[in-house]
Image: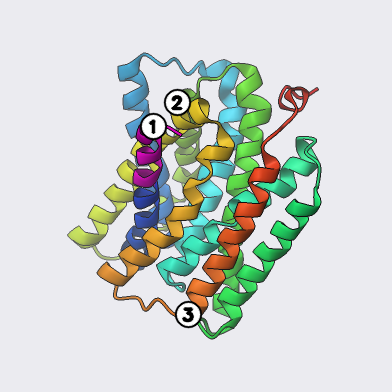
C-alpha cells in the first residue's frame, strides 16, 4: 500500500478512535438518541456541502431506496446503539466491540456474497467470539444487566455496519451510485428518519460547550470528513485493505481514553482486544476474493 494511503488509514483510525471519546463526553448531557440524531443530520449536511462543491450528483429519485436502507444500517442503528453504550461502557470496550464488524461481515459474505466458509475463517470467527468473552469476563466489566445490554448494543451496531457494507456492494456498486453520493444520501435520509423523535429527546438544560464541541467532532470529523476520505480509499485500495483500519481504532481509543478520560487500560481489555484483532487477521485475508457475479447480484 502506498505510504500516502497508509497515512490516511492511520489518520482515519485516530479520528474513529476519538469518536468513542466524543460519545463518552457528549451523551451524558445530550442524551443517546439526540446525539445519534445530531451526528447523522450534521454529517449529512456536511457531506451534502462537499458533494455539491465537488459536483457529485445524488439522483435522489433513482437512489432513494438504497440511500434509505444504508442510512438505517450505517447511520441510525449503529449511531444510536453506540450512543446508548457510551453511558455504561469505557471507550476502549466499545471500540474493541466495534472491531468485530469485519467478523460479522465475513459471516454475511458467506450468506449473501457467495464466499466460502474456509477453515481459517471459522477459526477466526471462533477467536472473535472468544475475544469478546475475554473482554467481558476477565474482570474488566461487572456483568450487570445494563452492561450486558450495552455490549449487545455494540455488537448490534457492528453487525449493522457489516450489513450496510453488504448492501452497498449489492446495490451501490452494480447500480453505479457514486461512493460520495451513497454516503451523503444515506446520512441525509438517516437524519430525516430520526427527526420525528426530536421533540421528545431534547435535553432539559443547555449542554455545555464541551458536549456541543464533541457533537461537532462526531458529526464533522468522525462521520463527515471520515466518510469523505474512507469511501474513495475503498475504491482505490479495495475493501479488504481498507478494513485494516479496524486494527488500529481500538488502540487509538485506548490511548485517547487514557489521556482524556483517565480510563484504566487493564490486562483483560488488552487481552480481549488482542484476540479480536488476531481473529480479524485470520478472517480478512480469507475474505479477499468475492465473485464478481455475487457483487452483481446474479
Which residue is rendered at x = 65% and y = 44% of the image?
A: 285
Q: Which residues are magenta?
A: 1-12
Q: Which residue is mark 2?
A: 180
Q: Is residue 184 visible?
A: no
First reached walking from the N terminus: tag 2 or tag 3: 2
Q: Secondary structure at mark 2?
A: helix
Q: Is residue 228 left or right of residue 208?
A: right
Q: Position of residue 60 (x, y in %)?
A: 52, 19
Which residue is rendered at x = 61% and y = 38% of the image?
A: 165
Q: CA distance from mark 2 to mark 3?
A: 40 Å
Quadrant in the rendering for residue 72:
top right
Give the camera-side residue of 63 and 268.
268
Q: Which residue is mark 1?
A: 228
Q: Is residue 198 left or right of residue 115?
A: left
Q: Position of residue 18 (x, y in %)?
A: 34, 56
Q: Are marks 3 and 1 in contact (CB under 8 Å)?
A: no
How many residues crowd around disc 3 within 10 Å: few (fewer than 14), some, or many (20 or more)? Answer: few
Q: Are marks 2 and 1 in contact (CB under 8 Å)?
A: yes
How many residues crowd around disc 1 within 10 Å: few (fewer than 14), some, or many (20 or more)? Answer: some
Which residue is rendered at x = 37% and y = 22% of the image?
A: 51
Q: CA distance from mark 3 to mark 1?
A: 36 Å
Tell me, yes or no, whether the highlighted magenta stretch contains residue 8.
yes
Tell me, yes or no, whether the highlighted magenta stretch contains residue 148.
no
Q: Secondary structure at mark 1?
A: helix
Quadrant in the rendering for residue 263:
bottom left
Q: Is residue 209 visible?
A: yes
Q: Which residue is mark 3?
A: 267
Please count the marks in the image: 3
- Select label 2 or label 3 by which is in front: 3
Q: Are marks 2 and 3 in contact (CB under 8 Å)?
A: no
Residue 60, label in figure: none
Q: Position of residue 89 (x, y in %)?
A: 46, 72
Amino acid at each position: 500500500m502506498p505510504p500516502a494511503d497508509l497515512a490516511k488509514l492511520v489518520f482515519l483510525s485516530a479520528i474513529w478512535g476519538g469518536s468513542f471519546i466524543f460519545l463518552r463526553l457528549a451523551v451524558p448531557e445530550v442524551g443517546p438518541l439526540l446525539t445519534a440524531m445530531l451526528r447523522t443530520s450534521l454529517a449529512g449536511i456536511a457531506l451534502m456541502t462537499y458533494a455539491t462543491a465537488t459536483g457529485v450528483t445524488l439522483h435522489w429519485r433513482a437512489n432513494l431506496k438504497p440511500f434509505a436502507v444504508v442510512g438505517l444500517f450505517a447511520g441510525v442503528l449503529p449511531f444510536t446503539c453506540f450512543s446508548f453504550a457510551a453511558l455504561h461502557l469505557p471507550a476502549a470496550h466499545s471500540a474493541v466491540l466495534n472491531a468485530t464488524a469485519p467478523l460479522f461481515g465475513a459471516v454475511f459474505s458467506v450468506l449473501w456474497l457467495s464466499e466460502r466458509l474456509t477453515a481459517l475463517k471459522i477459526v477466526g470467527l471462533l477467536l472473535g467470539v472468544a475475544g469478546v468473552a475475554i473482554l467481558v469476563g476477565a474482570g474488566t466489566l461487572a456483568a450487570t444487566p445494563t452492561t450486558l445490554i450495552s455490549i449487545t448494543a455494540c455488537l448490534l451496531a457492528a453487525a449493522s455496519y457489516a450489513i450496510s457494507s453488504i448492501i452497498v456492494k449489492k446495490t451501490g456498486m452494480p447500480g453505479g451510485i457514486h461512493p460520495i453520493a451513497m454516503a451523503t444520501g444515506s446520512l441525509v435520509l438517516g437524519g430525516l428518519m430520526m427527526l420525528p423523535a426530536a421533540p421528545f429527546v431534547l435535553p432539559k438544560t443547555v449542554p455545555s460547550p464541551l458536549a456541543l464541541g464533541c457533537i461537532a467532532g462526531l458529526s464533522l470529523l468522525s462521520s463527515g470528513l471520515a466518510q469523505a476520505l474512507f469511501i474513495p480509499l475503498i475504491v482505490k485500495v479495495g475493501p479488504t485493505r481498507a478494513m485494516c483500519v479496524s486494527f488500529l481504532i481500538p488502540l487509538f481509543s485506548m490511548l485517547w481514553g487514557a489521556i482524556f478520560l483517565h480510563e484504566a487500560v487493564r490486562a483483560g481489555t488488552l487481552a480481549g482486544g488482542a484476540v479480536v484483532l488476531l481473529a480479524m487477521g485470520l478472517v480478512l485475508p480469507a475474505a479477499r476474493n468475492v465473485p464478481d457475479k455475487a457483487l452483481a447480484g446474479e
